[in-house]
Image (cartoon, rainbow, N blue to C red):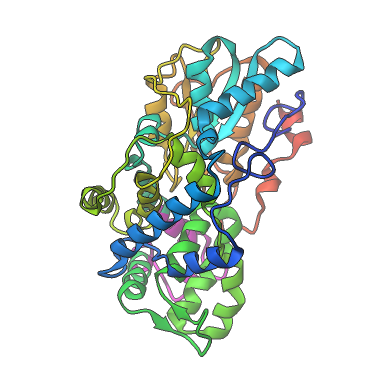
Amino acid sequence: MLVTTGGQYDVIGFDPRGTGATLPINCYATEADFVRYDALAPVGTNVSDTALGNIWALNQNIAQACAENNPEIIQLMGTAFLARDIMQVVDSLEEDGLLRYFGHSYGTSVGQTLAAMFPNRVERMVLDGVLNPFEYAAGWEYQALEGSDPAIEQWIASCIEAGYPACDLAADGATQESLHEKIYALLDEVKYNPVNLGGNITSDIVGPRQVFLPFDTMLRQALVYSPLFAPYLQSIMDRNVTRYRQLYPFLNSVVDPSNSFAIHCGDTLHRTDSLEDIKPRVDQMREKNEYWGQIFAPAYIACSVWKAESKGRYEGDWKAATKNPALLIGSPFDSRTPLSGARIAATVLERSVVLQHNGQGHVVLNSPGQCAIKAMQAYFTNGTLPELNTVCEQDFNIFSGQSPLDSYNLESLVASN
């Protein structure tokens, strides 16, 4: 953040409501309860004939548990409350009363709420990996799926460009077309016919969870995880259990969704007690993207059965004429918040400018390039916005072995400005 903002600011951050030490949400009586929930939850809505029904029942259960275990605070988690908290921090500084804000991913929803509620107090605002404000508030984000296929195709192209041995999957004369076929064949195989690699019942059976979730993790942080994920996929294709066991722990992440459910679901509008009402929405997710729609849908189902609504929720039209225009950043290869989200937000954030950063990953932080970093520095330093239709590139091929930190060299960036 110090580099991104030009080095002249004291950067303030804190735990939003529902996270860390700030009104933490705990939906499970014990850690064992969460482990059981995670083990029982299908990874996608169409990995079996019973998956959707199981997801529906489990999410009803977690919604009930969250409401029962957090009755006094569950309605206080919303984004509008967080926006007010942030402005209280600004006021407590007793400076000029103006907000200088950087937000990415969910933080862009916070930023859009701040802009709508306090437009005259926005001095600087950078939103990176921008959520579609209309779909976020409605509760089902179909547009967010637009980045999944481009992200995978660009990942395949980067593998072929890097070649073997930088990318294990580029061996044996692989082409972009042949590698595409191999990867999607594996996605179909594990969905319907899980692969048994060895004798460990807890990890050696490779099904959708062992492929789709690491794939999703890698796409969000491709520069970090691609050199691990390519040999991981290759180990499954080769039935190499030794190599698979070495790599799986680095790619397997288990996250308690309580905090994100409490914040996001409280903000959203859609509620239902009917599985039949959910089915058309799940179908629409799958129509948008056959593979990743089914993976993202369970989180939206959780919000549709959520038992609480955030108090003080912002219910306006998202139009905002901020004191100074905002800088919005997006990538067509962001599998979570594609470039289209920034373009939609720009239609309601007056005078805002969209910077296209062709990064492979979720937000610039995970796919950095000095072009985008310098654009943010110039904006935070003197309010200069990029020219319309500016396109920036990521610094390094995702199989280069470079770290995101290699792009954040304050001395070289300052010297070149």
**Quadrant of the frame with the C terminus:** top right
Nearer the observer, 340 or 322: 322
Residue at the far bottom: name it: 199
Tell me where residue 216 appears, x and y as whole percent.
47, 57
Q: Toward the viewer: 164 or 258? A: 258
414 lies above or below 325:
below
391 inside magenta stretch: no
Q: Look at the image and say whether residue 166 sits in the magenta stretch.
A: yes
Asked whether residue 170 is in view, the answer is no
* x, y percent for residue 308: 43, 39
Tell me what residue is drawn at x 33 percent, y 75 percent.
189
| As drawn, 290 above or below 338 | below
Residue 59 visible within the image: yes
Instruction: Name the chief secondary structure element in magenta.
Output: helix
120, above or below 372, in the image: above
Percent coordinates x, y for residue 232 in the rendering: 52, 72
Q: Quadrant of the N terminus?
A: top right
Residue at 52% across / 31% down in the picture? 79
Point 52% across, 57% down: residue: 217
Q: Give the range drawn in magenta.
A: 152-179
Where does the image place residue 404, in percent across and percent down from the top left?
A: 65, 48
Name the residue at 70% across, 47% down.
406
Among the 4 quarters of the image, the one containing residue 196: bottom left
How many marks the image carries: the answer is 0
